[in-house]
Image (cartoon, grey):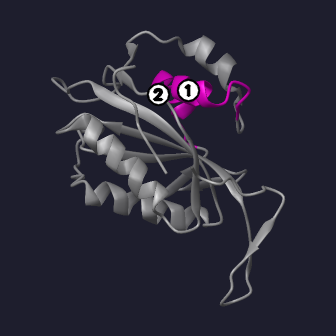
Amino acid sequence: MTETPNPNIIDADTLTGEMRPIRRVVIALGSNLGDRFGNLQGGVAALADTPNVWVTGVSPVYESEPVGCPPDSKPFLNAVVLADTTLSAHRLLDRALAVEDAFDRLRSEVKNAPRTLDVDLIVVGDRRSDKDELRLPHPRAHERAFVLKPWLDLEPDAEFLGHGPVAELLAKVGTEGLTPRPDLVLEYE
């Protein structure tokens, strides 16, 4: 079982003495190529194995119709991971990209091309970024049921930074095209 650090404590790097706040993060996972469930489980395991990242919850799995994807794209499996971390948003992004690469994610010029594993940072504490390489909070997640519903399952009173309560956002977008998959359960340690 993962131990949740106290969010009021600031972690000090033992080598440099640098003080690093602990931030709550929401990470969305998706896969629509290959062993979709295996890819999600591997993504969860890789995040849980990341130094200075403590996974505190993993949502149920949902199957969703592709949104904004090329024609003939297959359905996605989606889940949300909650974690606490002392990593900076940029270091966490580097880790997310490395996890995608480990699962042979191919980057393409085609927008929303099918992928073995997508690891998206939705929120990282109260961090905001509008740089091309890192946008926080995620610019479209507040419109995506496949992010909002799994997140709501984990945190019924969740607030999406800059957008409001997740429950209200989900009520606006609805859950059409989103199917619970209780037969698929992601594990973490």
Q: Residues within 10 Å of mark 1 (few under 14, many from 20)?
A: many
What kind of element bears circle 2?
loop
Name the residue rendered at 30%, 28% in the picture: 76
Residue 26 is drawn in which quadrant?
Answer: top right
Query: What's drawn in magenta, residue-wise?
Result: 138-159
Q: Nearer the viewer, residue 70 or 88?
A: 88
Q: Which mark is residue 116?
A: none
In this view, 73 is above or below 108: above
Direction right: furthest residue: 8
Q: Where does residue 89 sit, x and y in percent of width and height?
A: 59, 61
Name the residue rendered at 61%, 25% in the picture: 152
Q: Where does residue 4 sit, x and y in percent of width and height?
A: 68, 53
In this view, 27 is above or below 91: above
3D distance between C-alphas at marks 2 and 1? 12 Å
Q: Where does residue 17 sit, x and y in percent of width and height?
A: 74, 87
- Residue where numbered disc 2 is placed: 60
On whether residue 17 falls in the magenta region, the answer is no
- Residue where numbered disc 1 is placed: 148
Q: Please state which amino acid type lies under the numbered disc 1.
A: Leu
Lower position in the chain sequence, tag 2 or tag 1: 2
